[in-house]
Image (tube, rainbow, N blue to C red):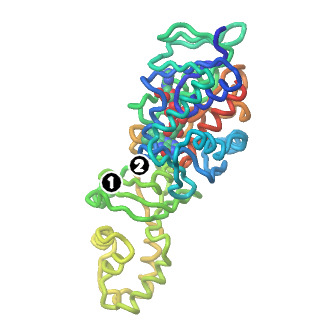
Amino acid sequence: METDVLVIGGGAAGLMCALTAGRRGRRVRVLEHANRCGKKILMSGGGRCNFTNTGTTPANFLSANPHFCKSALARYRPEHFIAMVEAHGIAYHEKELGQLFCDDSSKQIVAMLLAECADAGVQVDTSCSIEAVEALPGGGYQLRTTRGTMRAPSLVVATGGLSIPAMGATGFGYELARQFGHAVLPTRAGLVPLTLSGKHQEHYADLAGVAFHVSARCGKARFDNAMLITHRGLSGPAILQISNYWEPGKELLLDLLPELDIEAFLLERQRAQPAAELRTVLADVLPRRFAERLCETWFPSKPMRQFTHRQLPDLARQLAHWPIVASGTEGYRTAEVTLGGVDTDGVSSASMESKHCPGLYFVGEVLDVTGWLGGYNFQWAWASGHAAGSAA
Ligand code: FDA
């Protein structure tokens, strides 16, 4: 066979896997069905690619097996990727919370990965569709593609998740996993805006564009960050983060004033400004339009002196436990990631190799490992790609 490693998918994990294997002297070929590699990298981080998070730990990932990601993440850490970025002279900065972004453009990250691949002798074929995959009787895999038939002892599935189909996302990796006897856990859109319907949507819709800091909670998960009201529901980092944990039927609560002792604040204002209306008091700590909507719809505004000593603590409690009745999510069309995927039970956490099909590897988002918002998903793509590239 003239190729050692065939990689299906030229995204973040596939390119990292290819360049790592290529550097080891393996003859590697990447097969990408889109007309260019790394389209998701290009659109990531608002065009500046949040390429890693310096605070990455296994606790930042969701998976049916929370231990699975540990080995790969420990062996390929953010500083390893940062070293590559620096070696290519790419300027970057920390935005917040350990999130590293390019100063200029995500294009630099794709160019860097492709340059590293070229340097390692990797052949990259774009606009190449895979028609069939089969295991060869003597070991290895045969692919029928629009560029001809190819064979290799190692096959790496790096086809990503289902989010943003317009960018080339397919369920191909899941189908391939099933074909080779792997279980695929149910998938759903993650890091995605939530939708509201009926009166819940009516209450907020004309506030579209209003943003403020909240604490979003679902079960044990809690994220303090900005929330944005949209025409169809809620978005912003706090909502995208909590969307990974929310499913229809699960309770979702917002603390609308997470940085404030709300009860103490309301009692103090009652003492200091007894004639002030509740809506005016709330507008000091919340966006004015949102404070007015609260008072039009939920808490009739009146002068602070008219609230009893029972009512203000009750009001404070409601503001800290504001229920959101989401009707769903915006789905894969806008989701940044796909939750679920190839069950990690069937895959080695050290090498990403299938436990029952020698030479078959799964890397990146196609696996049931999903990170928080903030550079964690790319760090998983680099780490899992590196693990497979070191073994394949
Ligand atoms: P990825 O999707 O990158 O690559 C899969 C590749 O396989 C694609 O090139 C695809 O075309 C190809 N492919 C699919 N099916 C195929 C087939 N049948 N044959 C051949 N090729 C096939 N994460 C982060 O850490 N920081 C960030 O800033 C962002 N920002 C961001 C913005 C937006 C809008 C999105 C949608 C996502 C992000 N992400 C992110 C998430 C991040 O992009 C994602 O987790 C990684 O790209 C996953 O890397 P993979 O290589 O696994 O899949």
Task: Say which element carries label 1.
Answer: loop
Say if 212 sits above or below 126 in the image.
Answer: below
The amino acid marked with disc number 1 is: Thr
Residue that numbered label 1 is attached to:
230
The amino acid at mark 2 is: Pro
Q: Residue 379, image x and y in percent?
A: 60, 42
Q: Is residue 136 visible?
A: yes
Q: Are marks 1 and 2 in contact (CB under 8 Å)?
A: yes
Residue at position x 55%, y 29% from top? 115
Res. 335 visible in picture: no
Residue at the location (33% across, 62% down)? Answer: 210
The mark found on residue 193 in the picture is 2
Structural distance between the alpha carbons of marks 1 and 2: 9 Å
The residue at label 2 has a CB less than 8 Å from ligand 1: no
Write the residue at 62% across / 23% down.
156
Look at the picture and state if 299 lies above or below 158: below
Instruction: Note whether 152 is above or below 275 in the view shown.
Output: above
Mark 2: few/some/many CA within 10 Å (<14, 14-19, 20+): many
Q: Nearer the viewer, residue 10 or 338?
A: 10
Label 2 sits on a secondary structure element that is loop
Q: Position of residue 269 (x, y in %)?
A: 40, 87
Q: Is residue 49 left or right of residue 330?
A: right
